Amino acid sequence: MKKIIISVSFVLAVFMFCSFCSAGEYKFGYIDIQKAVTESLAGKEAMQKFEGEVKKMEEEILQDKDEVEKLGEIIKKQSMLLTDDVRREKEKDYLRKQRDFERKVKDSKTELQIKEAEFTNDILEDLIPIVQKYGKENNYSIIFQNEVRVLLYVSDALDLTEKIMSIYDAQFQKEKK
C-alpha cells in the first residue's frame, strides 16, 4: 500500500512538473529520510533509549528461558522417581511455562517494533515542518523523499539531507535546553 501511494505521488509530481515546465525555473531536491531519522541528534538519542529497552527485555527473556530450561531438566532427572500423576502434573506445568515463554518472546518483539515505529514517527513529526519551511525559504518547487524504487537516479547535488539534519539538530539542541 505504501509503495502504491509513493508511486502515485511520484507520478503526480512528474505530471505537475511537466505542466509547470513552461512557467519558469524550478528547483528540486530530495531527502534521505531514513538517514535523517537515524543520524540526527534526536534519532541517536531515541536509538539509545530504544537499545536500553531492548537490553532490559532481553534480560527478562533470558531469565525466563533459564527458568523453563531448569524446570525441564528437573522433570527429566526426577521422572523415574515420580508417580504418574505427579509426573503428568509437572509436565503439564512445564508445557504451560514453555508456552508462556514463547508468547512473551513474541509479544516482546511486537512491542519493540511498535516502540521503534513510535520513535520514528515522533522524529518525522518534527522533521517534516523543517523540510517544508526550508523548501519555502529556499524556493524549492519539489522536495522528494529518497525512495530507492521511486527515484531511479538523482544527482547528489540535489541531496538536502545534511542541510535539513543540521537545522533539525540545532532545533533539537535548543528545545532540549
Image: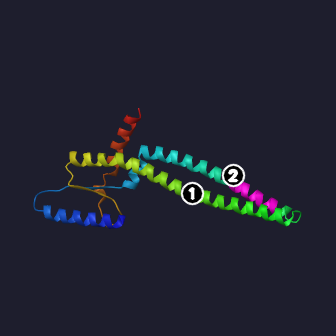
Question: Given the image, on which type of amino acid does mark 2 rest?
Answer: Gln
The x, y position of residue 150, in whole percent, is: 32, 66
10 Å crowding of disc 1: few (<14), some (14-19), many (20+): few
Left or right position of 83 against 93: right
In the depicted view, which residue is nearer to us: 153 or 177?
177
Tag 2's secondary structure? helix
- Give the Cα distance between marks 1 and 2: 16 Å
Left or right position of 13 against 56: left
Q: Which residues are magenta?
A: 63-75
| Dot placed on the residue nearer the N-terminal end, 1 or 2 | 2
User: What color scheme is it?
Assistant: rainbow
- Give the main secondary structure, helix, strand or loop, of the magenta stretch: helix
Left or right position of 109 against 92: left
Residue 71 drawn in magenta: yes
Residue 107's disc is 1
Tag 1's secondary structure? helix
Residue 62's disc is none
Point out the image quarter for the N terminus: bottom left
In the depicted view, which residue is nearer to us: 12 or 107?
107
Q: Residue at x 31, y 64 (%)?
A: 5
Q: Residue at x 52, y 48 (%)?
A: 50
The x, y position of residue 175, in whole percent, is: 38, 35
Q: Please, is residue 35 above or below residue 22 in the view?
A: above
Q: What residue does disc 2 label?
A: 63
Q: Residue at x 41, y 46 (%)?
A: 40
- Residue 160 visible to an observer of this rendering: yes
Question: Given the image, on which type of amino acid does mark 1 rest?
Answer: Asp
The x, y position of residue 73, in whole percent, is: 79, 60
Q: Going by the picture, which residue comes out furthest to the right?
A: 81
Point out the image quarter for the C terminus: top left
